[in-house]
Structure formats: structure tokens, C-alpha cells
Image (spheres, helix red, strand yellow):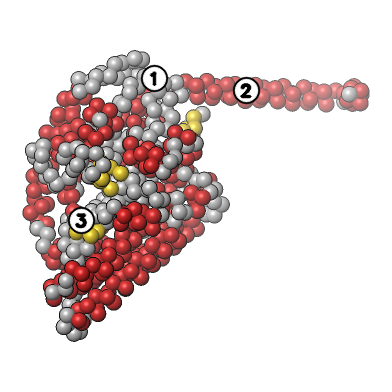
């Protein structure tokens, strides 16, 4: 210090420079401190809930008043512009792309229509527009049960609370339509109204944990970031004997475990079938969308990465960090999802995913082709006069072969979540198909047939549906008329009901909730 004083005495201009530098530094630190305080104040203001949300509020726009950033990003699931190599955010006619599927699902509703669904925003639209849900007019009209609404509407928790779970599952899909159609999957399905903590609202997941001796309430927050998705993105079936006979109670077949052999053994032990195949007469299992099961078999799950980490990564706006509720493929958001952990370029990461998808698709198409021929050849054996005893073992092979193919094909993102396991499933499916075809070849020879079994032209969706005998034009015309007449009535009833509820404003603090 004495040396500095000496320098300043000899060179006064040094003192002036030091004074100016110090003043500038203090001013800059003051600006920084003010900016930090401003951001903190802004964050506290923005995170302040603007209204109180009442229990089981199904209207997403009401939650949006309280949590505008999350709601605005949820609204972006309207965007259907993203298209990847094999999938995307828009509707794709999967039967048109893969006509063999019509034969694989002969006798089941998926043979009439299998359109790739869009984002959560369109959940109600997609389920009403598909041919699979039919054209119910009266309350007791089929073909689908009310249980099919379970993962399509934010009104489900409200109606389960009002009716009771079993009573919600009872009845038809058409009967519950006016109660479900107004609010697509949204906030109430995964969040607690008071704390905004993650919450399980569908009882099937809780019950599956309980049957396995596990307590889902002990799950960590990180685990919940996948489990809220596992309420719906799983394999399930309708247990019609669990309570009152005939009520299709939504059940997860996880009692033995979550891998394909565990679930297959479970279904076999209870003799469960979704339908009897129209051509082969095999007792079939239709895989739904076992995304969570295959995710648990992959490397990301083993490293503790959750569904939300990749499909709903964090975003920052101003001084606020929040979860992006535009639930979508990470391929459309690589920088915020994949590159949080992976240091490779976006181009390389996408190329890696596409490489896995190409390999899985190559094997999957082989499996589909074999299964289609297998059903046709089994029908040929029946037509030759094969007995039930002669076919029993073959039909069981067909059941298991298609179940394993379907488990891999029906899972969203299987080749990204668990490519090795997906290839294993397809490999065992192909092996079972070859085994069944060898048995059939010997059987038709015993029945007097020589030479190859004729296979019809099923090279397009139209030809395959014509071969099965599906009156597709009639079904489409009926659906179009139904969408123009019945669905507007459902929507009008829902709007009239909700018009009687309190209309929230950002300035409201304690509006009451009126149940219908």
C-alpha cells in the first residue's frame, strides 16, 4: 500500500485512473445486483398462482390461467408439422403403409382402421374419428365399452370420483361420450391441484403395484416423471371377471413381471384372449402400447433417465425455468433433450436413432410377412378338414409369435427405447412363425395337399380388406354421418354442462366448483 501511495505521489495520473476504474467496477456490480434482484422478483411474481384450482378441474384452460407457460407449451401439441423417418406428429394410415396388418388383425377392429394418433391435444378427436369406436347412437350401442375412454379425456378423474371406478368402466363408450368429449388429456391427469406435485389418477397403475407388493406412494419425484406416463402408455387388458361379471375392468398384466415372457405367461395362465382370429382361429392377444415396459428394458431407464427428461425437457423463459409440456419426439427437440447428456452433433444423434429404426424395421417387416402367410396357411388347413386337436399346438405358436411381434410394433419408440430387446422380440416371433409353418406344412401334407399353399394378393390395404371381407366403404360412410350428427350433440351437452360451472378469471381467488 505504501508503495502504491509512493507511485501516486510521483505519478498523479495513476491515482485518477484507479479512481475511474474503481467507480466503473462499482457501478457494474450495482447493475448486476439490481438485475439479479429484478429477476428474482420477476420469478416470484410469475410463479405466483393467479387462481385457486378446485379438485379434479378438467378444463385445461383453467389450469392455464394459473400456469400460463406450461399451458401454452401444452397447446403446442396442436402442431402436427413434425415428420420423422417412420413416424411423426400427424395422422398416418398404418394399414395403407403396411397392408399385412389387415390380415394380422382379421376379425378385430384394428383391421378396419389403424391411424397413427396425434398429440394429447387431439386425444378426443382421434378416438371419436377412428372406425374402431363405431357409430353408437343409443346408450347401449356398441361396439366399445366405456373403459376405452380411460386414457383419452381429462374428465375421467372427475367421472371416476363421481360414479366410482367400477361404475365408470360399466356401460358403453357411446353412453359416456357426452361426459368425456370436451376436455382432452391434460393437467388434471398428472398433477395435484393444490401442490402441482405429480399424481397418479388412473387406478389400474396403483392396483398393479399393489398386486406386486409395491407401494407407489413411495416412488421418488424422478420415478414419478415416468410413472405418470405409465398410467396409459402400457400394456393392459379388460378383466371381465374381476368384479361384476361382464364389466371390463382395466387391468395391467404385471403380476409376474414386465418383460414379454412374464406377461405372456400371465395371459396364458388365465386363458385370456382379445379375439379369435378370423382366418387361423388362433386365440389372439392384442398388444396395446407397451411403451413403459420396453422403456424399462432400455439403457435410458437403467441410467435413471425418465420419460419427461426426453419428451418434456426443461425450458427457460426470462427468469423462469419450467417443464416443456409440448410432449413430443426428442427428434424434434434434440438440443433440449438428447444434447443435455450426449455431446455429439444433432445430425449424428438423429442418424444413430434412424440407424436403429432401420434395422428394427427391416426385421419387423419380415416378421409381419411371415405372420400374414401363417394365418392364411392355417385357414387353408382348416378348409382341408384339419381337426381342432391337430391345430391346437399350431394355434398356440401363432398366438405367441404375433404377440411378440405386436409388443414391439405397438410400442411407441421401441427401437429408440430398447433396440436390442425389440430385435430379440422380433427374432423370437420369426422363430415361432417358422416353427408353426413347418408344422402346418406337415399337416396339410397329411391331409392330402401337395405343393405350395396359395396366397391371395394382399399387397394394398384395399386388397387386404377385400380379402378379409371388410365393408370399408359402408363403415366410412356411416362414420362420416355419425361425426356430423351425433358428436356435435355430445359437444353441445358438454358445453351446456360446463357453462353452468364458474367462469374463472385471472383475478378470481376462490371460485367454487359445480359438479354436474
In three-dimensional space, the C-alpha distance between marks 1 and 3, rounded to whole angstroms, equals: 50 Å
Could you say whether the residue bearing mark 2 is in a helix, strand or loop? helix
Quadrant of the rendered image containing residue 409: bottom left
Whether 449 is drawn above or below 120: the answer is below
- Return the mark for residue 356: none
Image quadrant for the C terminus? Answer: top left
Whether 228 is drawn above or below 450: the answer is above
Residue occupied by mark 2? 33
Could you say whether the residue bearing mark 1 is in a helix, strand or loop? loop
> Nearer the viewer's eye, disc 2 or disc 1?
1
Q: Is residue 485 left or right of residue 350?
A: left
- Return the mark for residue 50: 1
Q: Mark 2, residues whose alpha carbon is within 10 Å: few (<14), some, or many (≥20)? A: few
Estimate the x, y position of residue 473 in percent, counting from the top left.
9, 56
What residue is at 14 percent from the left and 34 percent from the top? 490
> Nearer the viewer's eye, disc 1 or disc 3?
3
Dot 2 or dot 1, earlier in sequence: 2
Q: Is residue 108 visible?
A: yes
In three-dimensional space, the C-alpha distance between marks 3 and 2, rounded to whole angstroms, equals: 68 Å
Dot 1 or dot 3, earlier in sequence: 1
Q: Is residue 477 left or right of residue 438?
A: left
Dot 3 or dot 2, earlier in sequence: 2
Residue occupied by mark 3? 275
Amino acid at each position: 500500500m505504501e508503495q502504491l501511495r509512493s507511485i501516486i505521489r510521483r505519478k498523479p495520473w495513476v491515482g485518477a485512473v484507479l479512481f475511474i476504474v474503481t467507480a466503473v467496477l462499482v457501478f457494474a456490480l450495482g447493475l448486476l445486483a439490481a438485475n439479479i434482484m429484478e429477476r428474482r422478483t420477476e420469478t416470484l411474481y410469475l410463479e405466483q398462482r393467479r387462481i385457486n384450482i378446485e379438485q379434479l378441474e378438467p378444463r385445461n384452460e383453467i389450469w392455464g390461467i394459473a400456469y400460463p407457460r406450461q399451458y401454452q407449451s401444452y397447446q403446442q401439441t396442436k402442431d402436427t408439422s413434425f415428420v420423422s423417418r417412420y413416424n411423426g406428429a400427424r395422422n398416418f394410415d398404418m394399414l395403407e403403409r403396411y397392408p399385412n396388418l389387415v390380415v394380422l388383425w382379421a376379425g378385430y377392429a384394428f383391421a378396419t382402421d389403424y391411424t397413427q394418433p396425434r398429440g394429447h391435444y387431439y386425444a378426443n378427436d382421434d378416438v371419436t374419428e377412428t372406425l374402431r369406436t363405431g357409430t353408437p347412437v343409443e346408450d347401449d350401442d356398441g361396439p366399445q365399452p366405456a373403459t376405452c375412454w380411460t386414457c383419452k379425456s381429462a374428465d375421467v378423474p372427475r367421472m371416476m370420483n363421481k360414479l366410482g371406478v367400477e361404475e365408470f368402466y360399466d356401460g358403453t363408450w357411446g353412453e359416456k361420450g357426452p361426459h368425456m368429449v370436451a376436455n382432452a388429456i391434460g393437467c388434471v391427469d398428472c398433477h395435484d391441484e393444490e401442490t402441482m406435485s405429480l399424481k397418479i389418477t388412473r387406478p389400474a397403475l396403483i392396483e398393479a403395484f399393489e398386486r406386486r407388493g409395491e407401494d407407489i406412494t413411495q416412488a421418488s419425484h424422478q420415478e414419478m416423471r415416468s410413472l405418470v406416463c405409465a398410467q396409459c402408455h402400457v400394456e393392459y387388458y379388460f378383466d371381465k371377471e374381476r368384479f361384476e361379471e361382464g364389466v371390463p375392468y382395466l387391468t395391467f398384466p404385471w403380476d409376474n413381471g414386465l418383460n414379454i415372457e412374464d406377461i405372456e405367461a400371465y395371459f396364458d395362465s388365465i386363458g385370456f384372449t382379445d379375439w379369435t382370429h378370423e382366418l387361423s382361429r388362433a386365440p389372439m392377444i392384442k398388444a396395446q402400447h407397451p411403451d413403459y415396459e420396453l422403456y424399462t428394458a432400455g439403457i435410458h431407464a437403467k441410467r435413471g433417465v425418465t420419460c419427461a427428461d426426453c419428451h418434456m425437457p426443461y425450458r427457460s423463459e426470462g427468469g423462469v425455468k419450467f417443464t416443456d409440456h409440448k410432449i413430443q419426439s426428442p427428434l424434434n427437440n434434440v438440443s433440449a433433450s438428447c444434447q443435455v447428456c450426449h455431446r455429439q452433433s444433432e445430425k449424428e444423434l438423429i442418424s444413430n436413432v434412424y440407424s436403429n429404426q432401420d434395422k428394427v424395421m427391416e426385421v419387423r417387416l419380415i416378421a409381419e410377412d411371415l405372420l400374414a402367410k401363417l394365418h392364411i396357411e392355417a385357414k387353408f388347413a382348416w378348409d382341408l378338414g384339419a381337426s381342432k386337436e391337430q391345430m391346437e399346438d399350431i394355434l398356440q405358436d401363432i398366438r405367441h409369435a404375433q404377440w411378440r411381434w405386436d409388443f414391439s410394433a405397438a410400442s411407441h419408440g421401441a427401437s429408440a427405447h430398447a433396440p436390442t430387446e425389440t430385435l430379440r422380440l422380433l427374432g423370437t416371433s420369426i422363430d415361432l412363425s417358422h416353427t408353426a409353418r413347418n408344422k402346418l406344412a406337415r399337416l396339410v401334407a397329411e391331409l392330402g395337399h401337395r405343393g405350395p399353399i396359395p396366397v391371395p394378393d394382399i399387397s394394398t390395404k384395399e386388397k387386404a380388406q377385400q380379402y378379409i371381407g371388410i365393408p370399408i366403404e359402408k363403415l366410412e360412410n356411416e362414420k362420416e354421418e355419425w361425426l356430423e350428427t351425433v358428436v356435435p350433440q355430445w359437444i353441445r351437452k358438454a358445453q351446456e354442462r360446463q357453462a353452468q360451472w364458474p367462469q374463472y378469471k385471472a383475478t378470481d381467488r376462490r371460485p367454487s366448483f359445480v359438479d354436474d
